[in-house]
Image (spheres, rainbow, N blue to C red):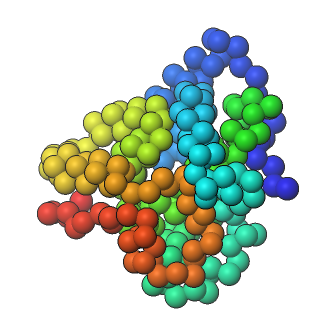
Amino acid sequence: MVILQAARIRLNGWQQAAVVVGSAVGAVMDPKRSDLVAAMGETTGRFAFQRVLQRMNNNSQGRIILEERPRIISSKLEHIWDLPPTTFGGAYADFMRTRNFSPDDRMPVRFVEEDADELSYVVMRSREAHDIWHTLFGLNTNLTGELSLKVIEFQQMQLPVAFMSFVGASMRFEGDKFKVFYQHYFPWAFTAGLQCKDLMSIYYERHFDESLEDVRQKWGIVPVPPAPIRD
């Protein structure tokens, strides 16, 4: 079994507050710092992840995922690299390959209690699915794409880290980019996150061979429309 948690880091109240503040400031300054985003997510998102866990338990596919605990890691994805780019798996592989990303790059869970194994899996699953969501919604990995996905993630999971990252980092837009984001990307992401299926209760690994457009339609996913000006 692949380890979901690194060595448990026990924090008292002051230490947890310091991690929250430090990771929040760092994540706002650089939303691509996955380690800081992960730390903030774990220390502020326990109740939100518990709600996600309950929702998965109430969903037939979600229960299967929790029982089987599939992992989105390289050793489990060897077959997707040869799939056509029009397939869901092939599009995800192309997204990762063109950016020199690895499915194994995600931070392990560090700040969830040792006896909360099921909750740790939910946290890890949300991290490993992040690039899959980029692929499904057609979002880039620039500031616009990352913040658009934060809006969708908040609509889906109500994670404080998604809201805080969005509010802080959106202030970094300059000139027309700020206007374009709030007039074009934000309304789309707000609606897209509400109307699609529960992203945490989709067994993605069972659909990699299917057409990307077919799975988007099946899961109610509307990819980002072209911006009125280049971002």
Q: Name the side, left or right, on which 231 lies relative to 200.
A: left
* Vertical comparison of 108 with 192: above or below: above
* Residue 109 to residue 79: above or below: above
Can residue 108 be spotted in the picture? no
Question: In this rendering, would 13 be left or right of 113?
Answer: left
Residue at 48 percent of width and 36 percent of height = 159
Task: Work out whether residue 160 can be spotted.
Answer: yes
Does 11 sit above or below residue 94? above
The residue lying at 29 percent from left, 47 percent from top is: 190
* Residue 158 percent across, percent down from the top left: 45, 36
Q: Is residue 43 left or right of residue 3?
A: left
Extreme right residue here? Answer: 1
Q: Quadrant of residue 216?
A: bottom left
**Residue 132 position (above or below residue 111):** below
What residue appears at the point 41 percent right and 41 percent down from the top-left corner?
Answer: 154
Q: Quadrant of the N terminus?
A: bottom right
Q: Disc count in the image?
A: 0
Q: Toward the viewer: 36 or 124?
A: 124
Indicate the quadrant where residue 214 lies.
bottom left
- Image-based side of 231 in relation to 222, left or right: left
- The residue that appears at 57% across and 82% down in the rendered structure is 209
Whole-percent x and y of residue 187?
22, 49
Q: Position of residue 105 (x, y in %)?
A: 65, 56
Viewport quadrant of the C terminus:
bottom left
Q: Which of the two residues, 174 or 155, is positioned nearer the viewer here?
A: 155
| Residue 22, image x, y percentages | 54, 25
